[in-house]
Amino acid sequence: MKTSTESTISYRVPLVIMTSLFFMWGFITCMNDILIPYLKGVFELSHFNAMLVQFAFFGAYFIGSLLYFIYSALKGDPINKIGYQNGLVAGLIISAIGCALFFPAAEFVSFPLFLSALFILGLGFTLLQISANPYVAILGTPESASGRLNLSQAFNSLGTTIAPIIGGYMIFKYFVGAEYTGADSVKIPYLIFATIFVLLAIFFKIIHLPVFTNHDEISKGLGVLKHKPLRYGMGAIFMYVGAEVCIGSILISYLKLKEVAGLDDNHASTFVAFYWGGLMIGRFIGGISLSTFKNNTVKWALIFVIAIVTTLLIMSIAHYKNGISFMEMLPYAGFVVLQILGFILGRNQPARTLLVFSLVIITLLLVTMTNIGVVAMWAVIAVGLFNSIMWSNIFTLAIKDLGEKTSQGSSLLIMMVVGGALLPLFQGYLADKIGIQMSFIVPLIGYAYISFYSIWGYKNLAKRK
């Protein structure tokens, strides 16, 4: 990897700029969880049809990354040809078009047009993911790449945390009134998002960022699929993304059930922030735990400080937005402590931590399916805390020892984000047939597979490859 700039250049400013981009697409992605109950009400959709929102959005990830993989294998890496910066600009423009299409979709009250807008938005985000993730990884030394990605992903999770609160307020409360009817209350929010993406595209076009060129030859053919940990890892990514999106997508509908919490849309969207906020907390903690400290006391002190600050941030937002008392939110703090204990049991080993966290989630989902009231409510919300490390740990285990085939393997893993399109659709179907509570069997099966992968799917197969 070579750069046109001096090796001594400071990458701090470019990293800050890129981190802001991670925040933005995290925010917009999580807005889907607000759109599902909103469009369900506007168009009087079944749970199955409402889940087409995620099908359109995450299906675009699959189509986009598949086309990218095929082109890369045959012609060479297109991002490497046009440059990471131009790739980011193109992704931002496509994302802006997708957001802008929400206006005619609302104007004509057309669900298919909403789905088309989401598909285009998903294509834009696919290009942003392909461009931004490796760019952040090379903005510094290889040894600190994991830390930089964890930091960027943590701010991505910050976006997913506040999106349900701000987005829920805009769509369910602020833009609902006499002058806004039907699907109109999404017009202004998504026009704002489109404007932001256009401004970001202009910004990324005119600023100077370090230029990198990858001279590694891309391995052609499908030989990468002979790597068994990657094949099983593709299944793990599929199950993880699908399960995570399943829970986030149906959470508002679940919290509205009288036997669980009986919340309205606006209040329920606030508690969705706790679910996604768990990923933010875990990724900040994970970034610290993966770092090297001369003094372990300082390391763990920093972990506890970060845990307290991020937890209080989420609680404070919920308190001032909806008047939720801190005493009412106390169970969440207890689960944060449990998460820290999970990191201790994981001993900074990807497979071990993956196993601990997946087993905790399975337990939480069983509690969710067999209980009612606040116990069931907080159990499902706490799943977000233990989702935090799954993407990075599965990804690391799956591409280990791929060598020159790493880029192809990474593309195949990104394709498996399609789990976020398919599993929520299946859960929506079951929710219509057997009820929301029992439909959590779908993500539970997903986490059971992840447990299998952490015990045998990676470790034993890697030895036999």
Image (cartoon, rainbow, N blue to C red):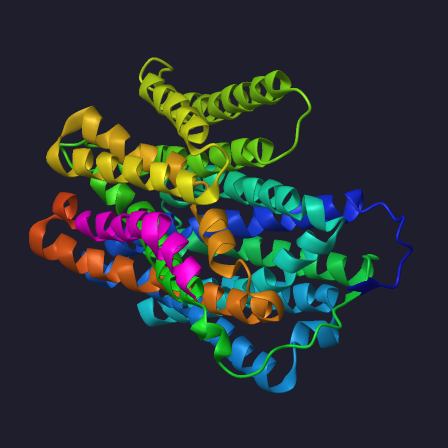
Image position of 79 (left or right of 50) = right
**Quarter residue 71 falls in:** bottom right
Residue 407 in the image: above or below residue 331: below
Q: Is residue 51 visible?
A: no
**Near-viewer residue (148 or 52):** 148
**Near-viewer residue (445 or 124):** 445
Q: Which residues are magenta?
A: 440-465
Q: Residue 384: where, in percent of width, then height?
A: 37, 38
Q: Is residue 296 visible?
A: yes
Image position of 219 (left or right of 398) = right
Q: Residue 272: where, in percent of width, then height?
A: 36, 38
**Quarter residue 256 falls in:** top left
- Magenta stretch: helix, strand or loop mostly: helix
- Quadrant into which the C terminus falls: bottom left
**Near-viewer residue (305 or 345):** 345
Residue 463 in the image: above or below residue 381: below
Q: Residue furthest left?
A: 434
- Quadrant into which the N terminus falls: bottom right
Q: Residue at x 46, y 27 (%)?
A: 314
Q: Residue 212: where, in percent of width, then height?
A: 78, 64
Image position of 8 (left or right of 340) = right
Q: Residue 311: where, in percent of width, then height?
A: 47, 24
Q: Is residue 457 rendered magenta in the image?
A: yes
Task: Give the total number of marks visible in the rendering.
Answer: 0
